[in-house]
Structures are given as structure tokens and as C-alpha cells.
Amino acid sequence: MSRIVVHGLEKSYGDARVLERVNVTAEAGEFLSLVGASGCGKSTFLRILLGQEQQSSGVVIVGDGPIVPEPTPQRGIVFQRYSVFPHLTAIQNLLLVEDFRSGGPFGRVFGARRRNARQEAEAMLTRVGLAHARDLYPASLSGGMQQRLAIAQTLLGRPQILLLDEPFGALDPGIRVEMHDLLTELWTEHGMTVVMVTHDIGEAFKLGTRVLVFDKVRHDPQFPSAYGATITYDLKLDRKTRASSHHLAKVAAMVGTTRPETTMATTAS
Amino acid sequence: MINAKVSRGGALFLGGLPFLFVAIAYLIASAQRLAVNPSDKLLPSPAQMWSAFLDLATVPDKRSGDLILWVDTYASLLRLFAGVGMATFAALSLGIAIGFIPRVRAFLLPFVTVVCVIPPLALLPILFIALGLGETAKITLIAVGVAPVMVRDIANRVMELPSELVAKAQTLGGNSWTMILRLVLPQVMPRLITCVRLALGPAWLFLIAAEAIASTEGLGYRIFLVRRYLSMDVILPYVAWITLLAVITDWLLVRLSQAMSPWAHPVEAR
């Protein structure tokens, strides 16, 4: 629903450069999978898109203008951990969205608007298969159920861009496949632009319309943090190339994945 | 050893044993002393203590006509709860502001950190001189004594909130104020109640110290008054009474926390 343009982005912490010369343009409705070795800066890139961190230099344009340098409702996020609010039940977590959006100084909507919000929340809860867990606190939900709730909550916020930071990283392979189907369905229904960071190459190919690999191209043996990572491989997927084993093996080699069996397991499904 | 499960009854029995030991040791020592000298005042028998306690609770004082125990209890609890209540309010408002808003943190955290290390009892003379010997000074001592630690604790708890939750709340449209209402406040509530429970110990200390020095009624005042006559038969029941009040307050706070924040007490909720 909104395009993202990144030009000449650079990010340093003191002397240590994490990202450099990152250029990418994502059209509205694309599903970008970001992969790369641990610590290569792909999560940093996502946090910049979120507004939690600011780039050291370069331009980031989201939608019609430069990115607002703090988290806003334009961009929704699902984290791997702490993805929902532990002090609220499942339904309260979803109601909170409308409370924040139009609750005014009390942070709470009343009357007819509350009834509408409740209906919408119940419908969303059923949509992600959590109707039975309506009044449970997140602590008594399984990891997969928490992530379903987190995705439902984020989608209720109607973001133009959905950011996912290893959303399924802590889940069992079986649950992960279920979550893939759910996410694909929701993405098709809502049509928002998605940027997902993942460690799982199979997942990246299965879900994304485009796979971006982050890696360092320049190395200084005396000072390893002198150069940052950039996008080294940008692969657009269509139905024919999707999950082609040739590309998959190539990207897996670039990332240096240590989990070929997970790659196979999630792709095969 | 470490894998042995303790049943409910077993836990009750084991937990009761130390109380039983102390009680038996006291009874033996008291009986021995009273056998040698029936008018011994240091270790009175349970019957003597009970009648002294009953006198204070039910017989009006000859001079003022008051029921001394209840007047003392009311005066002390009023001071205690006023002081702790003010400290709690400070902890909540200042603690959240310091923990959540970087500018307020930069402004107040160094000051609160320094105030924390001033021994409150050293301030007592200053409070008596500045505020007089009335209730204000005693309540202020309790509040000043426990507030700084509570403020720091709540501020720390707020700073420990996962940044993911704050970022997520912002992406859902929360602003600084609504996030305090809907995210920070409910999340620190269990910690605040724990804070109050821990602060009640020092609060009783400051209360009794202040009452011992300048007061005309109160539990601490009574203990220090009758000390002059070696009235152990009053002091010991008073100490037991104070202990009972403290235990009940603590129990009520635990229940309050369970009622307000069921999510923070998953075992009890089951």
C-alpha cells in the first residue's frame, strides 16, 4: 500500500559501521525477505524502517515523504519476543488498538465505538483462530498463539507497511508452517507492503516476492568493524523462480546457513 | 534432599515449629523466674500479659477516659498510612516520570540518587525544628524515609520495560500520556505493591522512632513510656500487636496485588 525508497543509507555506532551504501526500492504490496548472517545489520535496517533508530546518513522515504524518525501507526511491527502486552488478555490486547487510536486522553473508547471495536476484535480473533483463547493472558498462550495474537493486533492497526523481526524464529517447525499460511492469507487480503527479517532461508523464499541478502563486501583485517554490510543480492521471485533450489542453494551459501534441514523442512511444505 | 516435596500440612507443621520453640523457651524461662520471685517483672507469665493487654484494650484510662490500646493503634496507623501513602504517590508519579521520560530522568535521577543515601533519622531533628512536634513532622519523616528508595525502584522498573513493547504501543497510535495510562501504569502496579510491602518495614521503624521522641499517644510512644517502669507485661503484648498489624497489612497488600494484576500472579490464578 505504500512504497519504500532507501538511498545511500548508512548506519554507524561510534567507529563501528553496521550498514553502508544500502539502496533499495520496494513497490507497494511487495513482500521483502531480508536474510543474512547473524549481526549483519538486517535487524538494524528494520529498526530504522520502524523509526526506533535513525540512519547516520542517507535517505529513507516511506509512502509520500521522508520517514518520521519515531514509531508511528503507518508502520506496524511484530517482534520475535515481547510481541504482545502481558498485562492484557487476548481480546483486551486487540481492543487496545482502537483505544490507542481514538481513545483520546483516557486511552479508552466508550459506548457505541467500544461495541464496534469489540465486534471487530472478536472477528479478528476468530480469523486467526484464537476465539477459544479470548480471555487468556499471553503467559498462558503458546508461542505460536502469542505470535498469532501479535499479528492480529498489528493488522488491526491497519498499517501501510508491516515489519516482521524474525516473527517465527522461536516456534516449532510445524507451527511455523501454519503461521506461514496464515501470514500469506492475511497479506493477500490486506495487500500491505511487508518487510520480514528471517534466519530461515526456506521461509524467506516461501513467503517473499523478493529476497534481499545483507552481507559485507569490504573487509579490513586490522579493523573488522571499519566497513558495514550492504545488500549483496536482490532476487525478485515470481511463480516460476519461487523456491527454485538453484537460487535457494546460492543464497544459503551466501548467508552461510548452518541449518539446511530446517530450510528443506519449511520449503517442502 | 532438594527434590523432596512438602505437603500443605507438612509445610504448616514445619513453619509452625520455630514459633512453638520460641513460645516454649519463653514459658520455661518465665516459669523459672517467677518460681524464684513471684513479683519478677522481666519475664511475665502469659496470664499477666493478657490481663495487662485486656486492661489497655477495654478499661478506660483513669485520667483521660480513653481506651488506650485503640487510641494508640488509631494514632499510629494514621501516621503510618499517611506517610506511606504520600511516599507511594511520589513513587508512582516521580518514578514513572523519571523512568519513562528521558528529560525528567536527566533532571531528577541524580538528585533522587543522592537523597536516597541520606539517613532519614539524621533528618529527624531538622523536621522537628522546622515542622514542630506535631503530626506533620512524624508523617513527613515516614514519607521522606521511604519515598526515595520507592521512587528509584519504580523508575528502574519502568526503565526495564522491554523497548519492544513501547515501540509496539507507538505503532498502535499510543502517545506518551496514553502509554503511561495503558502500558506503564498497569505494568508497574505489581512492583509498586511489592515496593509498599518492603517499605512498611522501615516505615514502622521511623514511626516508632518519631513517637518515642515526641508524642502523646501511639504504639511506639506507649512502649517507650512504660519502659521506665519495666512493664514487660505491656511491652511484649504491644510488640506482638504491632507484629500482627504488620502481618495483616502485608497479607492485604498481597491480596490487592492479586486482585489488581492477575496476570502477574499466574500460579494463584490457576
Image (spheres, rainbow, N blue to C red):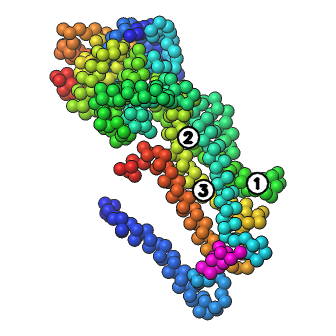
Q: Amino acid at mark 2?
A: Asn
| Disc 1 residue crowd, few under 14, some 14–19, many 20+, Cα 10 Å | many
Q: Position of residue B147 (x, y in %)?
A: 65, 47
The residue at the far bottom in this view is: B36
Residue bearing the label numbered 2: B156
Q: Are marks 2 and 1 in contact (CB under 8 Å)?
A: no
- Residue B83 horizontal/vertical position (percent): 67, 52
Residue A12 magenta: no
Q: Position of residue B158 (x, y in %)?
A: 54, 37
In this view, the residue in front, A2 or B245, is B245
Vertical relation: B141 (above or below) A236: below
Q: Are marks 2 and 3 in contact (CB under 8 Å)?
A: no
What residue appears at the point 59 percent right and 92 percent down from the top-left corner? B35
Quarter-wise, where is residue A157 in the image?
A: top left
The residue tagged 3 is B200
Badge 2 sits on which subunit? B
**Residue shown at 49% from the left, 13% from the top:** A67
Name the secondary structure under disc 3. helix
What whole-number distance in Å separates the C-alpha atoms at marks 3 and 1? 18 Å
Measured as percent of width and height from the top left, residue B87 is found at 65, 48
Q: Give the mark nearer the N terminus: 3 vs 1.
A: 1
Relative to A125, residue A47 above or below: above
Q: Earlier in the sequence, mark 2 or mark 1?
A: 1
Using the image, tell me which numbered label, if any, was put on residue B137: 1
- The quarter of the picture where the N terminus of chain B appears is bottom left
Q: What's drawn in magenta, residue-wise?
A: B50-60
Residue type highlighted by circle 3: Leu
Work out whether residue A223 can be spotted: no
Q: Is residue B51 above or below residue B121?
A: below
Q: Chain of mark 3?
A: B
